[in-house]
Amino acid sequence: MPRPLILVSNDDGITSQGIRTLVEIMTQLGEVVVVAPDSPQSGQGHAITVDHLLRLRRSDIFGDVVAYECSGTPSDCVKLAKHHVLKDRTPDLVVSGINHGANSSISVLYSGTMSAAIEAAIEGLPAVGFSLGDFGRTPDFSHTTEYILQIAKNVLENGIPKGTALNVNFPAKSKAPLRGVKICRQGDGYWKEHFDVRKDPHGRNYFWLDGGFVNRDLGEDSDLWALENNYVSIVPCQYDLTAYGVIEQLQNWNL
Amino acid sequence: MPRPLILVSNDDGITSQGIRTLVEIMTQLGEVVVVAPDSPQSGQGHAITVDHLLRLRRSDIFGDVVAYECSGTPSDCVKLAKHHVLKDRTPDLVVSGINHGANSSISVLYSGTMSAAIEAAIEGLPAVGFSLGDFGRTPDFSHTTEYILQIAKNVLENGIPKGTALNVNFPAKSKAPLRGVKICRQGDGYWKEHFDVRKDPHGRNYFWLDGGFVNRDLGEDSDLWALENNYVSIVPCQYDLTAYGVIEQLQNWNL
């Protein structure tokens, strides 16, 4: 069997520690090609670049591994990889991350890491986003590697159900070893926003978005519960946003 | 009963024709406050601004209607409106649009118009995004107004089921009158991408994202079918991305 072709991207940028770790793991499994943003793209959600040009430059940051840095968003990276860099070759697996910071619960919507994975899923490719719940400057990824390897092997073997991508989150490293993997639903939480209002040297207001995460989920089947209890969480995410359960109710409206 | 409070945003920017039309309609129903981007934000998906400061300026573009233009994304606009501009007042309705161009099928993921509505839904507010399938320079919105009024009245009366926002799309105006409203699911389609590769004056490559939409949906219950058959489509969209039907299958993996 030929070695599988694995596309790697992320949203923290091509120089981040998380993508270095992910590339190291993936080279154990197959031929790796990297197309990642040339600067941090956190919070970019599913943004694509339509009003500006895109740049793509070869990078030697990963030694022998073919890599490109792109001026666009994570979604742009996946599109450029599929339709320009790889052209007629189809990746057997697309992985994104490892994100510096959790992408559990509602954060999946804002996440550039997961938008790269979901973009790949839209293109019909098996895709996984990996994130670590550690926002520190030098996060420790060492406890994630054997799980990432195992999850990637499973995807290469089983594929991923059509129309979905996997959102994998790890708790920050603690003294206790990880307790295993839980397949979860997206937890019910939100960011309670606060805007920090400041004055610039010219006396004009400007704002910084700030906020704290609120967990309002009492269930034990959510990604939030899994992470709080030192499990790896895997949520299968779909890009069909239809709320099917609501269609009938709306059909009774006076329209 | 006091007049309802209606927040209006969009992604084409505060000077676009679509938001002018929407503001005009909403002033018939209640007190309107506008917080919209100061420049076009098409394709911004659910991006938020975390690495840059935000500006918010009062605008008199809508005369007596209180309006602000914001340097951020549509999601930023809704967050700033809720937590800074309106503070202790809670909108009875949040509307976004009218977008210049359709946001049916997979385009809902890339849509700034819908991200404003979904952001409002996450905040627990009833929200609707409106889009017109006309990419021309001077689209005709006249056939949309009575439907928008009726949909907004229904939302003010009935609310919207928790965890969802409505994605409303109109076909471009044609000689035939609209045939009514269909409650739909998100159609199965995708953008077949193409990158236009050009050389700058310094001999370096740059790229433009380009592509054509491919409809691979044969059903008659999708938004794509409705729009092709001159109906107004309404898709209820949820921000819980969990693919529940897949959880059990993944639990059989070797993890």
Image: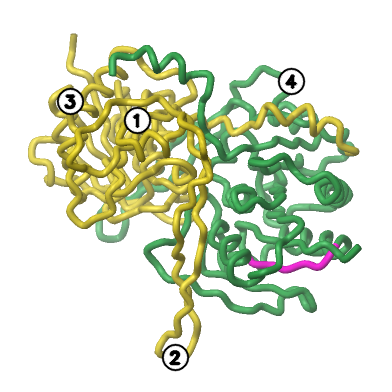
Chain colours: A yellow, B green
Question: Is residue A178 toward the left or the right of residue A236 in the image?
Answer: left
Report the amino acid beneath label 4. Glu
Expressed as whole percent of the image width and height from the top left, the position of residue B79 reads 57, 61
Distance between the alpha carbons at the discs numbered 3 and 4: 43 Å
Q: Count neighbours of disc 3 (C-alpha within 10 A) and say few if under 14, some if 14 to 19, many if 20 or more.
A: some
Residue B230 can be seen, yes or no = no
Helix, strand or loop at label 2? It is loop
* Residue that appears at 50% across and 82% down: A205
Span colored in magenta: B30-35
Sequence-wise first label, 1 or 3: 3
Report in which chain the residue with disc 3 lies. Answer: A
Residue A245's quadrant in the figure? top right
* Marker disc for residue B45: none
Sequence-wise first label, 1 or 2: 1
Q: Which residue appears farthest toward the top when viewing the image?
A: A1
Instruction: Return the residue at label 2.
Output: A202
Is B203 in the magenta? no
Instruction: Return the residue at label 3.
Output: A31
| Count of numbered circles on the image | 4
Distance between the alpha carbons at the discs numbered 1 and 2: 46 Å
Question: Is residue B228 toward the left or the right of residue A168 in the image?
Answer: right
- Relative vertical location of residue A211 with respect to residue A167 in this rendering, above or below: below
Distance between the alpha carbons at the discs numbered 2 and 3: 53 Å
